[in-house]
Amino acid sequence: MDDKFTNYVSCILNDLVGTISNLLEERRSHVDVDEIVKLRAENNLLRSKVVKLSQELEASNRRYFILKLIVLGAIGWCIWVLSEK
């Protein structure tokens, strides 16, 4: 699940980089105010998606870390119980 999520975040970041490149190219070629406003709005939307996905990734990583602790604790407990016999 983390790999799929990371790939999705990468795609969003690539879209964001592409949007920024488009903005820079538009600025160099000519000034089309409507297009620039549209691209800035799209850029802002992509930035907010990146923030949201980063927060989701952090939450997922925390859940994964807790799950690893639980599994390791259970394994340790099993080893302890077996060594007591």
Image (cartoon, rainbow, N blue to C red):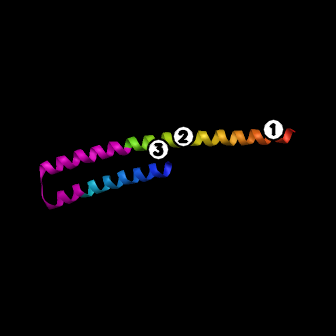
Secondary structure at numbered mark 1: helix
Q: Is residue 63 left or right of residue 50?
A: right
The amino acid type of the residue labelled 3 equals Leu
State how far apart marks 1 and 3 are (Cα): 36 Å
Q: Main secondary structure of the magenta part?
A: helix
User: Which mark identifies residue 81?
Assistant: 1
Residue 54, percent from left and from top: 42, 44
Between discs 2 and 1, the one toward the N terminus: 2
Residue bounds of the magenta highlight: 22-50
Between residues 6 and 47, which one lies in front from this camera angle?
Answer: 6
Residue 73, percent from left and from top: 70, 39
Q: Residues within 10 Å of mark 1 (few under 14, many from 20)?
A: few
Place residue 22 in its image quadrant.
bottom left
The amino acid type of the residue labelled 1 equals Val
Q: Residue at x 40, y 43 (%)?
A: 53
Secondary structure at numbered mark 3: helix
User: Are the residues at dot 2 and dot 1 in contact (C-beta closer than 8 Å)?
Assistant: no
The amino acid type of the residue labelled 2 equals Arg
User: Are the residues at dot 3 and dot 2 in contact (C-beta closer than 8 Å)?
Assistant: no
Q: Residue at x 39, y 41 (%)?
A: 52
Place residue 51 in its image quadrant.
top left
Q: Which residue is mark 3?
A: 57
Secondary structure at numbered mark 2: helix
Question: Magenta stretch containing residue 15, yes or no?
Answer: no
State how far apart marks 2 and 1 are (Cα): 28 Å
Q: Is residue 28 left or right of residue 46?
A: left
Q: Residues within 10 Å of mark 2 (few under 14, many from 20)?
A: few
Q: Residue at x 18, y 57 (%)?
A: 26
Residue 59, percent from left and from top: 49, 39
Q: Nearer the viewer, mark 2 or mark 1?
A: 1
Q: Which residue is mark 2?
A: 62
